[in-house]
Image (cartoon, rainbow, N blue to C red):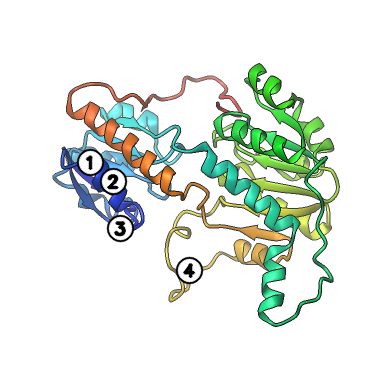
Amino acid sequence: MHVTVFSAHAYEQPHLTAAAGGRHELRFVETPLSLDTAAQAAGSQAVALFTSDDASAPVLARLAELGVRYVAVRAAGHDQVDLPAAARLGLRVANVPAYSPYAVAEHAVALMLALNRRLRQADQQLRRHDYRLDGLEGFDLHGKTVGLIGCGRIGGVLADILRGFGCRLLGYDVQPDPALSQRTGLRYVSLPELCAAADIVSVHAPLTAETRHLIDADLLAQLKPGAMLINTGRGAVLDTAAALAALQSGRLGYLGLDVYEHERGLFFEDHRQDATHDALLDELLQQPNVLVTGHQAFLTREALSNIATTTVENLDAWAQGHPAAHELQPAPAVLQPVCSP
């Protein structure tokens, strides 16, 4: 099968090439998929997309006109793909639902620790030969209450890790997992109860119509004063402007983000030499109690290898005339779960 791989970054190309093993011809395109770049898929039966690509209805229609029949998403999140439009156009779509929950969960802990122990400020001070400890006070994670919004694969791994720190665990999920509670001591509660009690809130919810801006000004106002908020899930689950206001008012004590609701066209690219800036993100980055990483939580060798392997397995199945193991279907017209396993 001939496959055009959009948003093909240098760090993932060797993994994809190795996984394909010569069974598929991969054309790597560094630019993201859009209506302007879709023509680069001409001659391909399949495209492989990332979270930064645009697979809206007009783009999918253009791909179908070019003869593309398969869309392989190289990530778990697939909100960038208009699944009903894909179904109407006869395009089959598959994703990589589980590549390494450890990568994302461990990154969430890294954000917690770096914010808590003020590592960014400490590093900057030492580079100026300022070895004072003033303003660098943190707190013990041991004994703190951590609330997990979304207790699926990643949330479950994070619960295991935080249990090792001696944290008390609260969870919010529409599909409670009794085994997780038994293993970690996590207690499922309502969202308001979680916000009121948690010293740290970590978000691991997918982006759906129901979860967009789930964490808004009203919910932020219910947080324990000075709480830490971590989001390694999907950017638009958090109302970023409301979070900035909560930081500036002192209601929110710390904010750690690996995802950002306006990241498309910004993250994954080098903008040092152009005028591409985001005023809201710039203001966030000026706050001393904010730490942002550019959607890199997934970026481990193990995760990249697993993503490549599963993506190629999806392509193998289609090439052999079989459904892919992780094919996606349009959601039924009912309310979607806030948090998926």
Residue at screen point 38% across, 39% down: 306
Q: Amino acid at mark 2?
A: Leu
Across and down, in percent, residue 308 comes to 33, 41
**3D distance between C-alphas at marks 2 and 3:** 14 Å
> Circle 1 sits on which residue?
20
Give the quadrant of the N terminus: top left
Q: Amino acid at mark 4?
A: Thr
**3D distance between C-alphas at marks 4 and 2:** 30 Å
Secondary structure under tag 3 reads loop
Q: Nearer the viewer, residue 259 or 82?
A: 259
Foreground disc of the pair 4, 2: 2
Q: Earlier in the sequence, mark 1 or mark 4?
A: 1
Across and down, in percent, residue 99 comes to 44, 37
Residue at screen point 25% across, 33% down: 315
Q: Earlier in the sequence, mark 1 or mark 3?
A: 1
Residue at screen point 58% across, 48% down: 107
Q: Nearer the viewer, residue 338 or 54?
A: 338
Secondary structure under tag 4 reads loop
> Circle 2 sits on which residue?
16
The image's mark for residue 30 is 3
The image's mark for residue 276 is 4
Marks 4,3: beta carbons within 8 A: no
Toward the left, the furthest residue is: 43
